[in-house]
Image: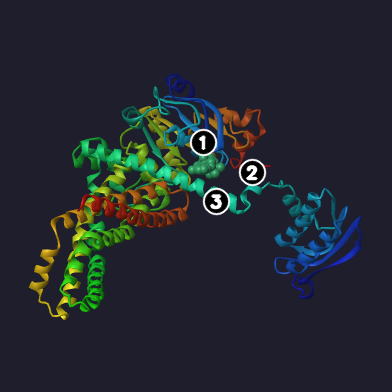
Amino acid sequence: MTDQASSECSFSIEESTAEVVKIALFGHLTAKTTATVWQPCIDLQQQYNPQSLVVDASDVDYCDGAGIGLLVAMRNNQIQQQHEFTLFGLKPQLERLFNMISLLPEEPKAQLVPPVDVITETGKFSFDAWNYTKESLTFAGEFCYQIGQTILHPKQMRWRDLAFLLENVGPNAFLIVAVVGFFLGMVMAFQASIQMKQFGATIYVANLVGIALTRELGPLMSAIILTGRSASSFAAEIGTMKINQEVDSLRTMGLEPLPFLAMPRLLAAVLMAPVLNIFMILFGLLGGALVMKTLGYSLPIYLSQLESAITVSDIIGGMFKTIVFGLIIAMIGCMHGLRTQRGAQAVGLSTTAAVVSGIILIIIVDGVFSIVYYALGI
Amino acid sequence: MNTDTEATISESIVQVDNVTLAYSDDVILRNINFTVKRGQIFVILGGSGCGKSTLMRHMIGLDQPVKGDIIIDGDNIVTAINEQRLKILQKIGVTFQSGALFGSMNILENVCLPLMEFTSLPKAAMRLIALSKLHLVGLHGVADYLPSQISGGMQKRAALARAMVLDPKILFLDEPSAGLDPITSAELDQLIINLAKSLEITFIIVSHELSSIYAIADEVIMLDETTKTITAQGKPQYLRDHSTNPKVREFLRAGVHGEPAH
Ligand SMILES: Nc1ncnc2c1ncn2[C@@H]1O[C@H](COP(=O)(O)OP(=O)(O)OP(=O)(O)O)[C@@H](O)[C@H]1O
Ligand SMILES: [Mg+2]
């Protein structure tokens, strides 16, 4: 085995007709060396497609899994064609290895590699999408029912987790909300001021910033941040509990995951979403103030302009929307957490799905709100 | 010893009645029937992947069987909902193959959780009860640790303490001694026997540890992946020597005498 020359392998064709192909193998058939003979041997077999394939292994000194693999591959090809395969000369201990693999039945793995064609894929996609929608609606129904139950029997909820969740959802997000809000307000004011300058109406930058933030951008941006931070963490936390069988464990104690895990998260999100929204608006207005300052308006003028621009219904409308967003975020996060399948990968998938579907749903609901508010004249 | 236990464990407490289990379209087990008697230590055996955990999940109401009934102390867990279901669940304690402690709570809080949710005992009492259960499973000085800070075997024992904290009538344990050293494992066996004989707790255990099975099991059933049914039922010693099914004899002999199955 230490001999350099013998640590290589080769083969020779002793006979090749449509009736019989006889191959002799030589040397060391190992993972490193088998590659050089594998394809030629298989090609030869396929070219002649012989009634009988004879492999002479008398000069094989050593053979590992790869070498056995080659023998098995050739044998399997013959069996598939219902042709004969004969192997001789293999050393007894190697023969035993070969026979061990020979004993394995041919598994029909066909369904593991589904054929990829557009129609099947489209059908599968639609079917999955339909199932997903159905499941989501069912979950939403259960979720709303549970909200009612929790309002009727507040004792069922696990209050102990609430403080921790509130902190995580709210105060821990203040920094990012403040930064996003500030720059959002500033950029918006700056862009608006360039346009407004043409009409000498730069004072109305305050109106634009104020109304945009209270009605649209404040609720929307804070909801998106909340989705990114909290829907994802709800999905990941609950998903991890699911794969660790913690959720099962709760259920066997008679503690259902909805009241026990989802309701505290829902409450945290619904309570904290408006707080984050207010934060976002205030910092946005601050960013606007900075731009207004450079345009030559003092803070009191800016504030009084805001006061005349923003109505109470803008604020209430925005706040109501925010609360609905909070509810959606908690629901999406918990739903994807509880939907988590098996395996560590699944948690990542759930988290991603929670964020993506959360953002999409929020944008759609925001559109619906715009239409409803418009129709109601708010 | 056997004869006098036989007399006290005549009453059935768990009854699995013609149950078929499946995950979506994959049938795992078909037409399963067996009865567990009060105070019995009942062991579910079988090769890896044959559906032992699945059977257990159905018996504790986590999954719905395709067909059949599972009666736990007089109530059918398959059809029970709300209050009735809760009533059944309070009679049972469960440990999972993975321990399944709550990662965000320390060991004491984990064990106290059922007490907090279902009793109005004072804090000090809960603490005392929890610590005594931890003591029972041989865990000392880890009450303040998080599950991630203790070993896998310790986690399993903490999970057992949690499962026992409300003194359930029936304990379902999925591979309780897998991953324990032989001494701890033997202590756990002794604990199980003591609880069964002194408190009349019924144990339904999934296990692979043959030495422990011979030490504790009053009765075993063996599941088979290919036939999807129970292939043998009875006392393990008896099955080992007298089962008509060579597969069963081989399974029950493997490892015990240190000789490989052939
Ligand atoms: N959630 C699930 N969804 C689909 N199939 C599952 C699920 N859980 C288990 N199975 C399948 O059911 C079969 C039985 O699994 P189960 O976990 O009950 O085996 P087991 O007997 O407990 O094995 P082990 O001794 O390894 O724990 C396996 O083939 C497994 O792939
Ligand atoms: Mg299992």
Circle 1 chain: B
Q: Answer with the quarter of the image where residue A319 lies.
A: bottom left
Q: On the image, numbered disc 1 is attached to which residue? A: B213
Q: Answer with the quarter of the image where residue A298 lies.
A: bottom left
Closer to the camera: disc 3 or disc 1?
3
- Rendered position, A108 above or below A88: above
Which residue: 61% across, 53% down? A117
Whether the residues at callouts 3 and 1 have beta carbons within 8 Å, the answer is no
Q: Mark 2 or mark 1: which comes first in sequence?
A: 1
Q: Nearer the viewer, residue A175 or A365?
A: A365
Q: Which of A265 and A320 is in front in this view?
A: A320
The label on residue B259 is 2
Which residue: 31% across, 37% down? B165
Q: On the image, numbered disc 3 is attached to which residue? A: A122
- Rendered position, B14 above or below B148: above
Circle 2 chain: B
Q: Identity of the amino acid at label 1?
A: Ile
Which residue: 25% across, 59% down? A219
- Rendered position, A196 above or below A333: below
Q: Identity of the amino acid at label 3?
A: Thr
Give the SS element for disc 2: loop
> Is B222 positioned to the left or the right of B117 in the image?
right
Q: Identity of the amino acid at label 2?
A: Glu
Q: Which of A365 and B197 is in front in this view?
A: A365
Same chain under badges 3 and 1? The reply is no
